């Protein structure tokens, strides 16, 4: 046999509508239907306690469910979207929002944003989209839903069961708020929700950022990892380096990570550089925006730790040569002389002549000579190409072409 098809609430009402005689569902039949869910009978209806929540269904003419929810849910109010609020949201005003139009346009949220983000898991979001337009509300920790007088026992039982599950999902103890936020930040499919969870975690309990660091640095969304790295007091640079070095990430994310590194001003670290900084300084070919950010990062660090020049690639040394001055510039020239190729000569030759400081000209001349000697290029083979104002390396014509 095939699986039984799940009926929608409207289909259940039509299927279980009163018979031809028009007999309305009795108080007893409704009570019997709800007892099968574990509800206990009392004079006015039935009641149930589950996970600290206390739910009562009053079985008068129009059944009413009222559920007292403990913990974080008491900080949040929600209900059907009011037209005036919806209009204000169109112009950027209104109550709390999650950044999901399918939910924000149907549900009016008020109260604590941390509670909202922590409670709005994917199953809760789906339930709210289905139930709040039908009148479901949460206020002062009380979940309320009213049914029409003609609701049948079967439909009532099925829908009360759904709301019992919702009440359980909305039950969250305050001490579980931070773990819930960290889980949402790491795994929620919606980037806006994940970022909001990280923000709330940082505001409510910043110490937990370090506690959950190993969990959060593997977050599904790279933007969450980027925000985490910028908020961490220690260990954030490792995360940023991973983002920069990941070729699978969008270039904008990698650029933002590199810019974040460039904005850091760490304490001087004499001696040897951290391994991830050595790796960063040897990168080449990242593209103009990333190369510029990398040069800014290197310049900021080298001002405190000149020994980092030993880890810079030739491409980065040339970028630094264009923007640094003083002793740092002489250090860059010296390292170009030690490891540079003829590709560096067009940048070095202008520094060997003109109205420049003797120490700078001497360093540039020495670097030029070491590059020429290492590359097998004679000094007489270097000429100034006047066309275009650039410099070029010219080789002598073949023997057969000489007169």
Image: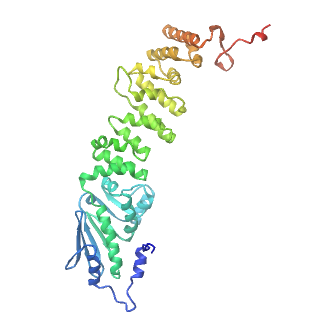
The answer to whether 237 appears left or right of 68 in the picture is: right
Q: Give coordinates of residue 267: x percent, y percent.
A: 34, 26
> Looking at the figure, which quarter contains the N terminus?
bottom left
Do we see residue 354 in this rendering? no
**Which one is nearer the viewer's eye here, 68 or 403?**
403
**Residue positioned most to the front:** 1
Q: Is residue 47 above or below residue 235?
A: below
In terms of image quadrants, where is residue 354? Answer: top right
- Residue in front for this viewpoint, 136 or 312: 312
Residue 114's place in the image compared with 328, above or below, is below
Q: Position of residue 39 (x, y in %)?
A: 24, 73
Foreground: 262 or 375?
A: 375
Residue 340 visible here: yes
Image coordinates for residue 28, horizontal then vertical, percent: 26, 84
x%, y% of residue 131? 37, 68
In this picture, is 1 found above or below 19? above
Question: Image point 35% across, 20% down: which residue?
Answer: 270
Name the residue at the right extreme: 403
Residue 25 falls in image quadrant: bottom left
> What residue appears at the point 32 percent right and 34 percent down from the top-left corner?
234
Q: Depth check: 72 or 275 in front?
A: 275
Quarter assignment of residue 44: bottom left
């Amino acid at each position: 046999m095939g699986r039984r098809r799940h009926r929608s609430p409207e289909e259940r009402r039509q299927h279980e509508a009163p018979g031809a005689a028009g007999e309305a569902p009795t108080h007893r039949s409704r009570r019997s239907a709800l007892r099968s869910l574990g509800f206990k009978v009392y004079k006015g209806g039935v009641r149930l306690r589950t996970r600290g929540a206390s739910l009562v269904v009053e079985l008068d003419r129009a059944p009413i469910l009222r559920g007292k929810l403990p913990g974080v849910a008491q900080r949040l109010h929600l209900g059907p979207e009011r037209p005036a609020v919806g209009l204000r949201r169109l112009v950027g005003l209104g109550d709390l929002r999650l950044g999901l139009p399918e939910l924000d346009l149907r549900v009016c949220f008020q109260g604590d944003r941390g509670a909202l983000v922590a409670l709005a898991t994917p199953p809760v979001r789906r339930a709210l989209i289905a139930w709040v337009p039908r009148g479901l509300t949460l206020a002062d920790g009380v979940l309320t839903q009213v049914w029409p007088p003609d609701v049948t026992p079967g439909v009532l039982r099925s829908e009360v069961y759904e709301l019992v599950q919702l009440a359980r999902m909305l039950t969250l103890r305050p001490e579980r708020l931070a773990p819930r936020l960290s889980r949402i930040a790491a795994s929620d499919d919606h980037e806006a929700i994940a970022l909001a969870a990280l923000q709330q975690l940082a505001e409510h309990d910043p110490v937990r950022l370090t506690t959950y660091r190993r969990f959060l640095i593997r977050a599904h969304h790279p933007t969450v990892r980027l925000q985490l790295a910028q908020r961490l007091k220690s260990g954030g640079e490792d995360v940023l380096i991973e983002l920069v070095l990941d070729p699978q990430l969008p270039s904008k994310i990698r650029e933002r990570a590199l810019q974040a590194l460039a904005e850091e001003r760490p304490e001087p670290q004499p001696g040897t550089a951290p391994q991830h900084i050595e790796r960063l300084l040897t990168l080449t070919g990242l593209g103009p925006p990333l190369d510029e950010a990398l040069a800014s990062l290197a310049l900021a660090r080298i001002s405190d730790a000149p020994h980092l020049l030993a880890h810079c690639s030739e491409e980065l040394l040339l970028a630094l040569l264009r923007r640094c001055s003083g002793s740092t510039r002489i250090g860059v020239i010296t390292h170009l002389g030690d490891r540079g190729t003829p590709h560096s000569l067009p940048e070095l030759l202008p520094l060997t002549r003109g109205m420049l400081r003797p120490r700078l000209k001497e360093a540039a001349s020495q670097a030029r000579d070491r590059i020429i000697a290492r590359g097998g290029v004679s000094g007489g083979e270097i000429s100034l190409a006047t066309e275009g104002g650039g410099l070029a390396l010219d080789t002598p014509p073949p023997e057969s072409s000489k007169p």
